Image: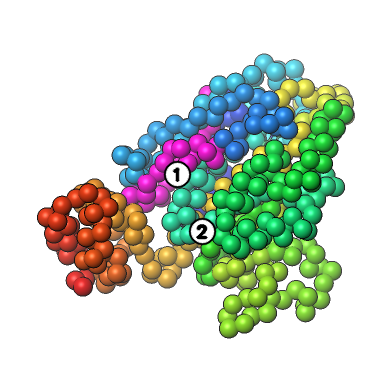
Amino acid sequence: MSTGPNTFGSFFRIVSFGESHGHSVGVVLDGVRPGLPLDKKVIQKELDRRKPGQSKYTSPRKEPDRVEILSGVFHGLTTGAPICLLVKNTDADPKAYEKTKDIFRPGHADYTFLKKYGIRDWRGGGRASGRETIGRVAAGAVAKQILENRNVTVMGFTKRIGPIEMSSASIARLEKLFNRGDFEGAADLIESSPVRCPDPEASKKMEALISETRTAGDSVGGVVEVRAFGTEAGWGDPVFWKLDAELAAGALSIGGVKGVEFGDGFSVSRKKGSETNDPFLCGEPTTNRAGGVLGGISNGAPIIMRLAVKPTPSIRIPQKTCDIQGKPRVIETKGRHDPCLAPRVTPVAEAMMSLCLAEAALRQDAVSNKKLDPHSARLAFLRGWEDLFSAWKKICCIEKEEMPPTVFSETELKSLAKEHSITADDVKSLQTFLGTFLPSK
Ligand SMILES: Cc1cc2nc3c(=O)[nH]c(=O)nc-3n(C[C@H](O)[C@H](O)[C@H](O)COP(=O)(O)O)c2cc1C
């Protein structure tokens, strides 16, 4: 659910800003509740996975993509104020685009932006550049942290590049790691491939294909798969804002993504009902052909989404086009481009899925009246930020009775005291403070 052309989300709202060759790019997050530990290193790690120049298969633009947290975080915790995350453009080269500023590049948004706004930032695609996704990845890292607190893990990988696809044996190997909950092992396998394909043999072939295609001045498409593990049943809405509809909107908002499918996806059009339904055994689905969503609502099984990514539009092969005066022209796009977008789309797709799921989880909290992230509560409380804690309580609409009494039992307070090196007296005053709005045990 969005309220503006650069805004995504409602409960967990982000506004993306910046142009590819302008001063900076970034995001403002509005609605992140106070007390969430926000580690800059975690955001940076995600940005490093997205940045150009990671391997010879990505754009050679040299950008460190260092994130700066401009607001909304105090002593490592979110304060409830808008969080502004900014990344400066340090290797911008607008001159490289001067020659083509009056020419519509095929496959790019030059023509449509000009038609829409009557003015266009031609420096590297401006807002339509892949660089705009920095804000999404930074915000997605925050969403990932929120989801991790709920034991939800989101992970993506490259499944296909051109005609080269992961083997079914390697998919089974990856799924074994997922099923064991070994997400670190799965991530290592994915990230050890320069194209993010967790099938070493297929990865080598993909790398060779990308190199060949680039040498020929062309580019190649691919398929990215993203999965979410640990989602509860009940996220998403039943009519217009179905979870799969929102996830698809998020995925299709990424430049170069042209198709989305869930679970068995488009293949269901060739199947029978008996081959498509997931049988229920005592409420638990046994297979996951639906990809984790039924009737627009998560069913508790892993969410499986695939994105069709088009070949990079900027290619060196001469292409016919026209200029803004309508004169025929021929364009050969030189400069720094990704020969295949799929490996770089992977962390962006994870970010968009995380943003959608954080939004859906918070919305479901409002519906189910279940509230409280004990981790945030403890931290805000233990640091003695009574105001912050009360504000947070107000934001979350926690009534006295709704606070789960198990969260702050006497024993737990004692172990918290030990864990955070505070005295027994502190524990007593904490207990008194809590007593102002917690049911006594
Ligand atoms: C992470 C990322 C990097 C991208 N890098 C390039 C690039 O180097 N060259 C290019 O021509 N397009 C690149 N794109 C794709 C274009 O931004 C996109 O195709 C273009 O704006 C047109 O939008 P559409 O393909 O969604 O219609 C990239 C997209 C993403 C998400």
Q: Amino acid at mark 2?
A: Val
Quarter, ligand 1:
top right
Q: Is residue 94 magenta?
A: no
Helix, strand or loop for disc 1: strand
What is the CA distance from the residue labelled 2 to the residue labelled 1?
Answer: 20 Å
Residue 195 is tagged as none
Which residue carries the number 1 mark?
Answer: 29
Q: Give the residue displayed 74% in from the left and 49% down from the top.
A: 199
User: Mark 1 vs ligand 1: CB under 8 Å?
Assistant: no
Q: Are marks 2 and 1 in contact (CB under 8 Å)?
A: no
Q: Is residue 36 magenta?
A: yes
Question: Considering only vertical position in the picture, is 59 above or below 367?
Answer: above
> Residue 1 lies in what quarter of the image?
bottom right
Q: Give the residue displayed 50% in from the left and 45% down from the top.
A: 141
Q: Residues within 10 Å of mark 2 (few under 14, many from 20)?
A: some
The one nearer the camera, 412 or 64, is 412
Q: Amino acid at mark 1?
A: Leu
Q: Is residue 259 visible?
A: no
Residue reaching furthest left? 425
Question: Considering only vertical position in the picture, is 174 above or below 139?
Answer: below
N-terminal-most mark, 2 or 1: 1
> Which residues are drawn in magenta?
23-47
The one nearer the camera, 333 or 415, is 415
Measured as percent of width and height from the top left, residue 5 is found at 57, 44
> Residue 400 lies in what quarter of the image?
bottom left
Measured as percent of width and height from the top left, residue 236 is found at 54, 65
Measured as percent of width and height from the top left, residue 413 is found at 23, 61
User: Mark 2 vs ligand 1: CB under 8 Å?
Assistant: no
What scheme was used to colour the molecule?
A: rainbow
Q: Give the residue displayed 66% in from the left and 65% down from the top.
A: 291
Residue 152 is tagged as 2
